[in-house]
Image (cartoon, helix red, strand yellow):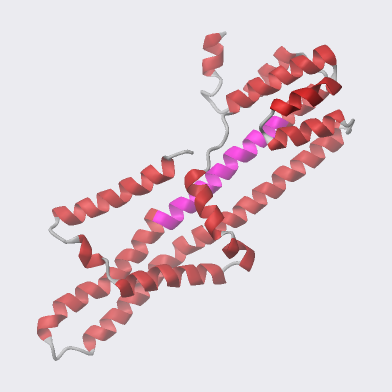
Amino acid sequence: MDPASLIGVGVAFAAIFMAMTLEGTPISHIMLPAPLILVFVGTFGVGMASGIMRDTTGFINQLKKAFVAKPGKPDELVETMVKLAEKARREGLLALEDAMKDVEDPFLKRGLQLAIDGTDSEELREILEGEVDAKRKADKAGAKIFTDMGGFAPTIGIIGTVIGLVHVLSNLSQPEQLGHMIAAAFVATLWGILAANVMWLPIGNRLKRVSEVECNQMELVIAGIINIQAGANPRLVAQKLRSLLPPGSAEPKKKAA
């Protein structure tokens, strides 16, 4: 599990609540049922309306992914493929059938199986790249509802404030209650802006980032499998794959060497 999202959202809420406390505003003053229902349920509704039903049914899974997804370590993936390249060069591609039992990455397993089955390198690349493209599109669709909700939430909050002000104007005969009612009216705008910038937009961006990392690793796997299938020298395979790693990822290996 990568804790970046949990820590980040927690820090943001802590900063907001701390600022309120320092200003002398009780947190209970913004925990009003009507604005919370309007902003969160209303935003979810318009987010649903902006996509298709499949996007909505995957909402919970995408939310879990945003907080608990942990992309694999690319340097470990490179080491695995270098070992496979050594075995394939020494014993042949068919020897990788036994080695595949220890491979955890499902995409790497599928690619190796295609190579072992004798799939042409161009066809193999086309199949695996098609899978990467399909994943990238699916992940983009999964993140869409969160980015849409981030765009809609502030406006929904403003609608809540207008509703509250209508209530205020209908009670001008009670001046002693006006201050409280006006403050309550602006709570919806607060929650709309807060939800958009502390929750929905960060979650959408997190999903896009996780997808980018996972797709980059899948492309790394494709490069490794093509080289393994071609019988390339394992040291050459290691150099090629490490050159594709993000800056800094290959440094520990160089120092160890």
- The answer to whether 142 is drawn above or below residue 110 in the figure is below
Question: Is 126 included in the stretch rendered in magenta?
Answer: no
Spot occupied by residue 153 in the image (x, y as percentages of width and height): 41, 66
Residue most extreme to the left: 176
Q: Nearer the viewer, residue 31 or 122?
A: 31
Q: Magenta residues?
A: 199-221
Q: Residue at x 76, y 28 (%)?
A: 225
Q: Is residue 83 left or right of residue 197?
A: right
Q: Quadrant of residue 254?
A: top right
Q: Is residue 238 left or right of residue 252?
A: right
Q: Quadrant of residue 150?
A: bottom left
Q: Nearer the viewer, residue 186 or 48?
A: 48
Q: Is residue 252 left or right of residue 89?
A: left
Spot occupied by residue 68 in the image (x, y as percentages of width and height): 49, 44
Q: Residue at x 81, y 32 (%)?
A: 113
- The answer to whether 131 is drawn above or below residue 21 in the figure is above
Spot occupied by residue 170 in the image (x, y as percentages of width and height): 23, 90
Residue most extreme to the top: 257
Majority SS type along the magenta span: helix
On the rendered image, what quadrant is the C terminus found in? top right
Q: Residue at x 52, y 67 (%)?
A: 47
Q: Let me know if residue 148 appears in the view.
A: yes
Q: Nearer the viewer, residue 197 or 142?
A: 142
- The answer to whether 238 is drawn above or below residue 144 in the figure is above
Q: Let me know if residue 52 appears in the view.
A: no
Spot occupied by residue 120 in the image (x, y as percentages of width and height): 89, 32
- The answer to whether 44 is drawn above or below residue 181 in the figure is above
Question: Is 204 included in the stretch rendered in magenta?
Answer: yes
Count of numbered marks: 0
